[in-house]
Image (cartoon, helix red, strand yellow):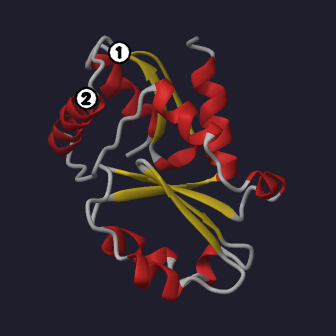
Amino acid sequence: MKMKELVALLERMCCSDVKTYVQSGNVVFKSSESNGVAMGAVIEKALYGSSVNARVLVLGRAEFGYAIASNPFPKTEEHPNTLHLFFLSEPPHDPDNVALNALKSDSEEIALIDNVFYLHAPDGIGRSELAARVERLLGVGATARNWRTVSKIGEMARVFS
């Protein structure tokens, strides 16, 4: 789906100030709906009606800001493509920590803070055996963004303060 079409769809759903970032479904908007899970379900249904089958994860500005502020690897911010935040659909109830640590390379660092799994992969996300298995090992759905994208979305969301 083109981002222009996604913006129009969200505006029809009574979202305002809709802005997108790159062609990957990153959207910032205002809505009277304060429940992110409920809003995500409504958007998923609308997308499905537009022939797009995609999971939707909606985070509030405070929740997104908390994820940024909680970065356990601040030194990695200088290399924004090496730090990835996996935003989780819910807190994992029984993550496979043994397997997570076994798949982590010597150069990688990981942390799970609430609904966010942080992966510092200095050798590249494509070379990380762990990255491809995060959802299965945590037992919940996830969507990942690198630090550059997270920072840009955070800047976009701050204009609503």
The quadrant the C terminus occupies is top right
Label 2 near label 1: C-beta < 8 Å?
Answer: yes
SS type, badge 1: loop
Q: At label 2, which amino acid type do we have?
A: Met
Q: CA distance from mark 1 to mark 2?
A: 9 Å
Nearer-the-camera pick, 48 or 73: 73
Q: From the viewer's perspective, is 115 left or right of 74?
A: left
Q: Position of residue 96 (x, y in %)?
A: 35, 76
Q: From the viewer's perspective, is 40 left or right of 16?
A: left
| Rendered residue at 62%/15% (across/down) | 159
SS type, badge 2: helix
Q: From the viewer's perspective, is 70 left or right of 37?
A: right
Q: Position of residue 117 (x, y in %)?
A: 49, 58
- As drawn, 4 above or below 110: above
Circle 1 sits on which residue? 31
Q: At label 1, which amino acid type do we have?
A: Ser
Circle 2 sits on which residue? 39
